[in-house]
Image (cartoon, coloured by chain):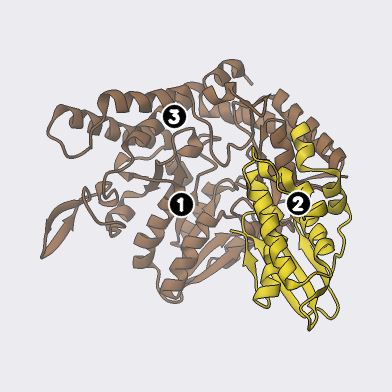
Amino acid sequence: MDDLRELYQETILDHNRKPRNFGPLENANREADGHNPLCGDQLTVYARVNDEGIVEDLHFEGSGCAISKASASLMTEFEKGKSLEAVRADFERFHDLVTSPPDSPAETEGLGKLAVFSGVREYPMRVKCATLAWHALRAALEDDGKTVKTE
Amino acid sequence: MTLNIEAIRKDFPILQTSMRGKPLVYLDTAASAQKPRAVIDAMSDFYRNHYANIHRGVYRLSAEATRRYEATRGRVARFIGAPDEREVIFVRNATEAINLVARSWGEEEIGPGDEIVVTTMEHHANIVPWQMLAEKRGAILRVAAISDEGELDEDDLVRLLGPKTRLLAFTEVSNALGTINPVARLAAIARERGITTLVDGAQAVPHHPVDVAALGCDFYAFSGHKLFGPSGAGVLWGRLPLLDAMPPFLGGGDMIESVSFEGTTFAPVPQKFEAGTPDIASVIGLGAAIDYLDSIGMDRIAEYEHALLLHATDRLREIPGLRIVGTARHKAAVLSFVLDGVHPHDIGTLLDTEGIAIRAGHHCAQPLMKRMGVAATARASLSFYNTREEIDHLAAALRKTREIFC
């Protein structure tokens, strides 16, 4: 079960039980669906972006496993108030973290609480769960909304 | 319950291994079965000592490989009660078998306005080929309902069988719920109405004796890899007159009688449907798997698995927050379930750390998941190499899972 605590850290379990920023966002001007055809997980990310290109508010809703739900929840907290450019950089950093080889040091700099997802590296089948919300967020911000798949 | 499980488990080398430092508990046989040493050895022996292409060489080695390959056809025919071994077509898997029928029989026989009836509990392999066919030929796909318990609504199915119905395609055993359908009764109803039947037997053949002649269907499809044989060899069984009348599915070598640029005449069945070099060694391995199963006895296997299913059902029902999805009266040893507050994928990962392999997801049966009101389930599928102790281990790990997440 020690392995397991690496993956399911308390923060992840907490955000799974009580997801933050959960539910539709009023006055959202961007949204996109994320869908993982492998497991049927699906979520929607809503964002309100102002004229200065700042993500003023960020919500999500949907159903998924603890990893995808906690990842979405922590992401909405982490990216709220950031510029589109900063979100883009975080996307890359987060993606690099969860897809890096498990035996290499985890590069968590600048990722704050999101560092709890470094355990996902041990479970390649779960990387898509951790990145589902991020792909949806990127689609919402870049392409102005469409369904993205993590396949 | 007269099986010597300890001895049986020793026949499966992988069951002696450990996973993440724990003894492997393999509860995913419905996805693919583990292989007994007899199968592994038969394939290895074939490659080491008997391998050559079949139906071609004039030399002894090829003749011997051909003899072994064709002997397996007879072996399969006896195993499933096929009256004539020419009715056994070797394909890759059940999916290919169903596609063969859809493309060859279907494109010839199904026309605009014709109807194909399937059930809500089908695997995607018994939905998508018919959808593709219906789309191509302007036919209509109709779907028979099931109950909340996961049993086929036979009245609804009979209602759907009309003058335009040309095909009834259904599974004998649901891969996701374990429901066993009354094949003989349904096939008889279809036959009275002149409707052709195809049965997806992928989950049935590994669990109980199958006699296609007694079932009375027209086509029967299954995969070797779920029957403790290697991946790469599966079977389509069909009635000889139907197969004779069907055009080839794939064209090429080994399926012809003579070829000229003016035209080609095709070989008779089964060669007509076996274009190109098949997975010869896998067919040999499938034969070894069948020999192995017969040495134990499919009726004894069914009996043991049923007792194991009852034990597992009791154990899982005791777990707070656990709900079994699929509670048909007639069930194979498949337990799909959901656990309050824990997503099936998280269950799968947690059990993995205990060395327990289960399937989590939609089980290639998305319409069924939707009907049962779940996005996904966790599924433990049992076989005759599983034990009560393994089930108890599963139950304990599930309790722990709930403690962690809730």
For badge 1, the amino acid type reads Thr
On screen, B81 above or below A22?
above
Left or right: where A126 falls relative to B125? right
For disc 3, the neighbor class at 10 Å (few under 14, some 14 to 19, many from 20) is many
Determine the colour of chain A: yellow
For badge 3, the amino acid type reads Ala
Q: Residue at x 46, y 72 (%)?
A: B135
**Tag in front: 1 or 2:** 2
On screen, B118 above or below B27?
below
Q: CA distance from mark 3 to mark 1?
A: 20 Å
Indicate the position of residue A15 as horizontal and vertical percent values.
Answer: 85, 53
Q: Quadrant of residue B153?
A: bottom right
Q: Are marks 2 and 3 on the same chain?
A: no
On screen, A133 above or below A13?
below
Q: Residue at x 36, y 66 (%)?
A: B107
Q: CA distance from mark 1 to mark 2?
A: 48 Å
Instruction: For mark 3, give the secondary structure.
Output: helix
Asked if residue B334 can be seen in this view, the reply is no
Disc 3: which residue: B289
Left or right: where B190 falls relative to B243? right
Q: Nearer the viewer, residue B205 or B191?
A: B205
Disc 1: which residue: B95
For disc 2, the neighbor class at 10 Å (few under 14, some 14 to 19, many from 20) is few
Disc 2: which residue: A109
Indicate the position of residue A91 as horizontal and vertical percent values.
Answer: 69, 61
Q: Quadrant of residue A64?
A: bottom right
Instruction: For mark 1, give the secondary structure.
Output: helix
